[in-house]
Image: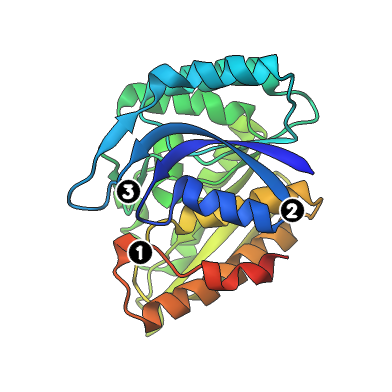
Amino acid sequence: MKKVAVIQDLSSFGKCSLTAAIPVLSVMGVQACPLPTAILSAQTGFPSFFCEDFTSKMHYFEEEWSKLQVTFDGIYTGFVTGREQIDHIFRFLDRFHTKETVLLVDPVMGDAGEAYKLFTEDLLVRMRELVKCADVITPNVTECCLLTGLSYEKLHSYSDERDFIKALEEAGKTLQQETKAKVIITGVNPPSAHTNQQLIGNMYVDGNKTLYSAMPYNGEGYSGTGDLFASVIMGSLMRGDDLEKSIRLAEEFLAKAIADTSLEQIPQREGVNFETFLGMLL
């Protein structure tokens, strides 16, 4: 069974990060080996939460796993609390990342035009270095803007969908050229001035082509959907699936989970009912 080191936080409520990655990877036939960056009582979108930063503990995992002489087929990074944790990740990569290891970096820094509470310029500088090591990067639109310098406000000032998509595609190509990674920009929500239907989708840029797919959008931003998407991509890569097929699977899986969650009127911060649809990933 293939093994993936999953480096991100554990949040008890919110169905995100490790509580999303572990079941998705497991049902896809992959052993998820968690290295927590933080332990939280609930994800940071809740009005109150406890957070234990695991920065000082990360090196113990590296040391103990080295003693076990384990190897990883994949490494998947997500939420980090700051620059120092990315420094730890670089040391982890020095020891465990080989030419055969697939590295997926989900550069978790913000959403909906807003940086997360723990975001700093130092974190951004180091994240720009980390994504250059990746095989696949899964930023949302906000994170793509942060990584490339594209103005989120200017992007969302376009009233025409074609102008919006073109500007985002140029940013995606810039990121791809700088990193040489395959880039999947998630949560693409173009303007809908000429239609009554809002859309949301994903843009895939690999250096040779750009693929953009969209589906109806209910206007809700649920916790953990980006983590679920990236986890499906990681699981698919471990199975040898091509990225286009992987993206379609992730979209179909999330569409079902989001529709069910919306039907039950579950608050956005609590995440989506993905568990019911894990069978789609077998």
Graded by Cα atoms within 10 Å as few (under 14), some (14 to 19) or many (20 or more), the crowding at tag 2 reads some
| SS label for mark 3 | loop
| Residue beneath the point at 74% across and 53% down | 29
| Residue beneath the point at 48% across and 17% down | 87
Give how far across and how far down residue 223 sits, in percent. Answer: 38, 58
Task: Report the amino acid beneath label 2.
Answer: Gly
> Distance from label 3 to label 1 (Cα)?
14 Å
- Which label sits on residue 37? none
Query: Is residue 169 among the parts visible in the rendering?
Result: no
- Which label sits on residue 43? 3
Instruction: Tell me: residue 28, above or below residue 70.
Output: below
Q: Are marks 1 and 2 in contact (CB under 8 Å)?
A: no
First in sequence: mark 2 or mark 3? 2
Q: In the rendered image, which quarter is residue 212 located in?
A: bottom right
- Residue placed under numbered mark 1 in the picture: 221
| 35 with respect to 122 (left or right) | right
Quarter containing the C terminus = bottom right
Give how far across and how far down residue 111 sits, in percent. Answer: 35, 50
- Residue placed under numbered mark 2 in the picture: 29
